[in-house]
Amino acid sequence: MPVKVYVDGQYVPKEEASVSVFDHGFLYGDGVFEGIRAYGGKVFKLEEHVRRLFLSAKAIMLKIPMSENETCERINETVRVNGLKDAYIRVVVSRGRGDLGLDPRKCPKPSVIIIADSIELYPKELYEKGLEIITAATNRIPPECLNPRIKSLNYLNNILAKIEGINAGVAEVLMLNHNGYVAECSGDNVFCVRGGRLMTPHESAGILLGVTRDTVMELARKAGISVAETNVSRYDLYTADEVFLTGTAAEVIGVVKIDGRVIGDGAPGPLTRRLKKAFEEYVRE
Ligand code: PMP
């Protein structure tokens, strides 16, 4: 079935779905977005994603031209219209069409776009074997400059880090914060296992508070595994028993090498595999 994209209230074929070159989302990255998955016809953590979208929009003084409930309905509808059961959904709200200056007041109408399609972030075998990553020289933007909790259309910070990873031949990169602690990866949150306990960077590290991160912490705590949201150093990761990443697109994936250091015994560890399985069962519930 050809993909139909929701663009400002209309469903248009993928090839015709477009926004103006004067849209400040295009000109300046002025806008916010969400990446969401649907499993078996049900959109996963829909309210949580839509809440985060609205909070991101509020932080940049962007008024989304519909309610949170209506946004949820439109997202469900887009999945339905495309006849999808398992899908990756991208919701974009940009400042809309304006002039060539920065002034957002010149953009009277935000653009709302919803795309439901498929995604495969990492090849299947990497979920079995685990990922190798490196630390990027590009640090995560300090929260006082642009808070990474805002999921904005400005992803150049992450893309610069990603390019370093591509040049080094790895699929994901670790990003440190301005204090030298671990923040997150270019598109995923990071966890490590030390002595049977989970550690993940606290939000004060300057990270996107991932919906998958929240879900995995909840599943871990339910299983009696303690989770500390705290400062995480590269030493903590290098010497961890296990390291794994979480994200809507990535789901849960083990990391087996960081900057040349083999993590644990070089394969996704038992807790990683257990949480990956718990996550897979949970999303299918
Ligand atoms: N950090 C960054 C920078 C991201 O872009 C994402 C989403 N791809 C995540 C973390 C993971 O967040 P979520 O689990 O909500 O997808």
Image: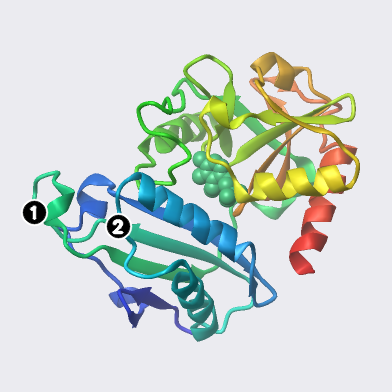
Mark 2 neighbour class, 10 Å CA radius: few under 14, some 14 to 19, many 20 or more: many
- Is 285 rendered above or below residue 34? below
Quarter of the image containing the C terminus?
A: bottom right
Name the residue rendered at 84%, 54% in the picture: 277
Mark 1 neighbour class, 10 Å CA radius: few under 14, some 14 to 19, many 20 or more: some
> Hey, what amino acid is under mark 1?
Asp
Picture quarter with ligand 1: top right
Q: Residue 91 vs residue 243: left or right?
A: left
Q: Is residue 184 visible?
A: yes
Circle nearer the N terminus (1, 2): 2
Mark 2, residue position: 94
Mark 1, residue position: 99
Tell me residue 163's x, y (percent): 44, 34
Query: In the structure shown, which secondary structural element does the residue marked by tag 1 occupy?
Result: loop
Q: Nearest the camera: 273 or 195?
A: 195
Name the residue rendered at 43%, 28% in the picture: 143
Q: Residue 89 vs residue 103: left or right?
A: right
Tell me residue 261's x, y (percent): 72, 19
Q: Residue 180 vs residue 59: left or right?
A: right
